Amino acid sequence: MSKKLVAYFSASGVTEKAAKKLAEAAGADVFEIRPKIPYTDADLNWMNKNSRSSVEMNNPSSRPEIADRVSEMDSYDVVFIGYPIWWYTAPTIIQTFLESYDFSGKIIIPFATSGGSGIEKSVEAIRKNCNGKVLPGKMLNGHPTEEALKSWIDSLISQ
């Protein structure tokens, strides 16, 4: 039986709720990807081209520092990585997370929340920056049932 981790970044709490529900359905441990310098409301103002999030997302080499590390990452076989969609892709802190570990031999399953964008562009970016086996991602908007989450997890992991 594989050991699972749900690692997520959440700026407003929406992705956090999805991550915790997913972790419960998967029987997984949970790790919050927190920036070393927390985001303020002003930092997250996507309407302001000079806000921290706008500046980070417009710079492909931006790598916001993460506050903590996953202890014993080597013990996990399956890692779900969750995030909100920003500018049609994953926030740059997700790239920081991916570059912080060796995912060789691991199954990586992206999931995201968004007000309207899809997950496809972010999954492609994860595939380019991760040496694990990256499976198709899923949007976890709304309130998926535990049964629906378990069915999705089982269908992916049995591949």
Image (tube, grey):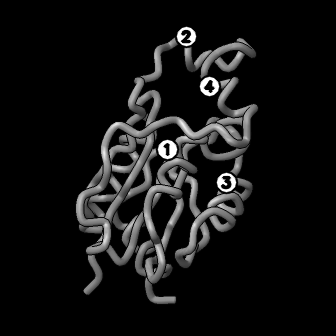
The foreground one among 153 and 70 is 70
* Disc 2: which residue: 42
- Observer-side mark, 1 or 3, equals 3
Residue 142, position as x, y percentages in the image: 49, 44
4 or 3: tag closer to the N-terminus: 4
Q: CA distance from mark 4 to mark 1?
A: 24 Å
* Disc 4: which residue: 53
**Residue plotted at (46% across, 22% down):** 39
* Disc 1: which residue: 142
In this rendering, would 93 be left or right of 2? right
**Residue plotted at (30% across, 55% down):** 70
Q: CA distance from mark 4 to mark 3?
A: 16 Å
3 or 2: tag closer to the N-terminus: 2
Helix, strand or loop under label 1: loop
Q: Are marks 1 and 3 in contact (CB under 8 Å)?
A: no
Helix, strand or loop under label 2: loop
The foreground one among 50 and 24 is 50
Q: Quadrant of residue 133?
A: bottom right
Identify the mark at residue 122; answer none if there is no mark.
3
- Observer-side mark, 1 or 2, equals 2
Task: Say what amino acid the circle numbered 1 marks.
Answer: Gly
Residue 66, position as x, y percentages in the image: 41, 40
Q: CA distance from mark 1 to mark 2?
A: 26 Å
Determine crowd level at label 4: few under 14, some 14-19, many 20+ residues with C-alpha closer than 10 A. many
Helix, strand or loop under label 3: helix
Task: Say what amino acid the circle numbered 4 marks.
Answer: Ser
The foreground one among 17 and 93 is 93
Determine crowd level at label 1: few under 14, some 14-19, many 20+ residues with C-alpha closer than 10 A. few
